[in-house]
Amino acid sequence: MLILFSGWGCSQVSQQSGSSNSAPNNPQISLSASRVILAESPASSLIQVSAAADDSDDDLLTYAWTVSSGNITGNVAASTVYYEYPQAEGSYTITCVISDGQHQVQISTLLKVFED
């Protein structure tokens, strides 16, 4: 099997009404490898995934991760986690919600797994 990263970004901002605080902006999500060979070892099924955003109010940002299939390992509240992708052909969505405590932005990327 061959893993290929097919990236796309989708951001969605949620804000509380009446707030002068700005939402996190310029959200980004990235994977540690754009192309890897799927091996039988469970350790090789892991890729590093990172998210980032700017906050003009210098608020502390928090992160929450979800995946369409597979598992997030490590601290799921951190900006960088590991994604254990399924060892099966398919397209898998990785999503991160970044929050400053008052507003949040959601960003996703897609990982495609292909058979050789």
Image: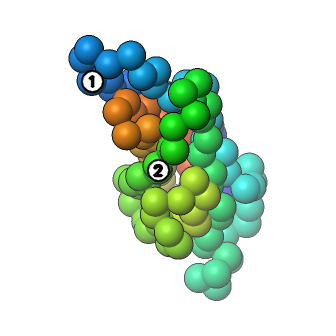
Viewer-proximal residue, 84 or 74?
Answer: 74
| Residue 91 visible somewhere in the drawing | no
Q: Is residue 47 above or below residue 45?
A: above
Q: Residues within 10 Å of mark 1 (few under 14, many from 20)?
A: few
85 lies above or below 101:
below
Q: Nearer the viewer, residue 104 or 110?
A: 104
Residue 16 is tagged as 1
Q: Which mark is residue 45?
A: none
Q: Secondary structure at mark 2?
A: strand
CA neighbours of label 2 inside 10 A, class few (<14), some (14 to 19), many (20+): many
Of the two numbered discs 1 and 2 on the same chain, state the one appearing first in sequence: 1
Query: Is label 1 or label 2 in front?
Result: 1
In percent of width and height, residue 38 lies at 66, 69
Amino acid type for the residue under numbered disc 2 = Tyr
In this picture the colour scheme is rainbow
| Residue located farthest toward the left when viewing the structure as drawn | 17
| Mark 1: amino acid | Gln
Position of the C terminus by quadrant = bottom right
The residue tagged 2 is: 63
Residue at 74% from the left image edge and 61% from the top image edge: 36
Using the image, determine if residue 65 lies above or below residue 7. below
x, y (%) of residue 30? 66, 45
Identify the residue at image location x=65%, y=61%: 48
Residue 34 pos. (x, y %): 74, 49
